[in-house]
Amino acid sequence: MKHPPALARLIAALNALPGVGPKTAQRLAFRLLQEQRAAARELSGALDKALEAVGRCGRCRMLAEGPLCTLCALPARDDSQLCVVESPADVIAVENSGSFRGRYFVLMGHLSPLDGIGPEQLGLPDLLHQLEAGAVREVILATNSTVEGEATAHFIGDLVRARGIRISRIAHGVPFGGELEYVDGGTLAHALQGRKDLD
Amino acid sequence: MKHPPALARLIAALNALPGVGPKTAQRLAFRLLQEQRAAARELSGALDKALEAVGRCGRCRMLAEGPLCTLCALPARDDSQLCVVESPADVIAVENSGSFRGRYFVLMGHLSPLDGIGPEQLGLPDLLHQLEAGAVREVILATNSTVEGEATAHFIGDLVRARGIRISRIAHGVPFGGELEYVDGGTLAHALQGRKDLD
């Protein structure tokens, strides 16, 4: 059966969201137009406002309202450490761990030449520019532990090392509280390779 | 870490969607404001348009653009059979089965006195009004097989029977292709109770 055009358009727009299939999109559209019309109106308003107000931080490329993001605007952070991550969600994850007090640089992706994403698209010229300012003593590479993330880390590592700045990669191994029996082989290989002497 | 206000508002609005938790809402918001700004703009426009254009069908209460829904506007349906369902999604499901050529009546919910949903809210006065017009020879109750759906079916059944119109309930039993071993006890009890003589 064919939906009326405005409903079909809404279903298609919801279906375009990541992780929302056609069936979920239809269910969401029905709910939004039946019981949740106020929620629908609020979502539309919030989208418009966010599209208008939220851009990128001029320093770390994080999503920001205004020229600097919440973190870059804080004076009380350690300017000597710069943590490089792939996405805004990674910044939130590291912040929530409560174990880092430095600054961030958000690549908004990883190197992917086939998709036309090279050093320019990841803002690496900006990154090098910031390193030249001299405050950063260590760059911590916290890109994902995927093939693309590793390649990106390797590429940035070379650039940073050439400038005589300390470069490090976050550790990979058995998750905290993880049982060896349920850890995959790749992780275990990393954990063995990255073993540390007990003293 | 605190999100900027426009971003926090968008995350809250997405979180209000059925089935979208706080983590998914954050992921959706980041994606919509990073790679998918065009999709975000389209979603906002589609919501506005649908809220403005989509209302209820004056005859069956289905979601409709204009006074009548797509199905009620079709002349080539059987006016003598009326299928009563709880939601627009149920209409789609029955239509997709290809086994019904009559008309629908959409309750947009089920009886739920604690939530203030009584016969009025389900449009039952409208339904009775339609039955009085005389074209309907059979009302098929296709509300859900839940406690509320059964109670609603029972209630409507009494109203319809009092008017001397044939009333039926869709069959409940083992799903087509279902294996007894994996069917729950309630379904099996229904299937046994609703058994038919072979001839």
Image (cartoon, coloured by chain):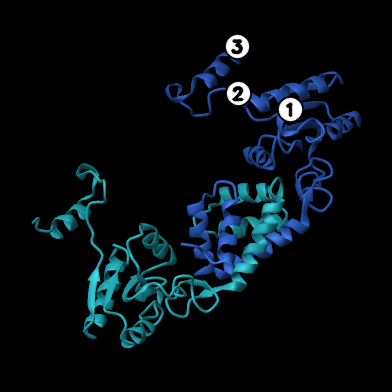
Chain colours: A cyan, B blue
Q: Which residue is mark 3?
A: B197
Q: Which residue is mark 1?
A: B140
Q: Position of residue A87 (x, y in %)?
A: 41, 67
- Give the residue type that dot 1 points to: Ile
Q: Position of residue A166 (x, y in %)?
A: 22, 77
Q: Which residue is mark 2?
A: B172
Residue at mark 2 to residue at mark 3: CA–CA distance: 16 Å
Q: Nearer the viewer, residue B24 or A13?
A: B24
Mark 3 vs mark 1: in front: 1
- Give the residue type that dot 2 points to: His
Residue B92 in view (yes/no): yes
Estimate how packed mark 3 is, as few (under 14), some (14 to 19) or many (20 or more) residues with alpha carbons within 10 Å.
few
Residue under the image location 21 percent in, 84 percent down: A164
The answer to whether A53 is drawn above or below residue A22 in the figure is below
Residue under the image location 70 percent in, 57 percent down: A41
User: Is tag 2's residue or tag 3's residue first in the polypeptide sequence?
Assistant: 2
Mark 2 vs mark 3: in front: 2
Estimate how packed mark 1 is, as few (under 14), some (14 to 19) or many (20 or more) residues with alpha carbons within 10 Å.
many
Q: Position of residue B55 (x, y in %)?
A: 78, 50
User: Is tag 3's residue or tag 1's residue first in the polypeptide sequence?
Assistant: 1
- Give the residue type that dot 3 points to: Asp
Q: Quadrant of residue A52?
A: bottom right
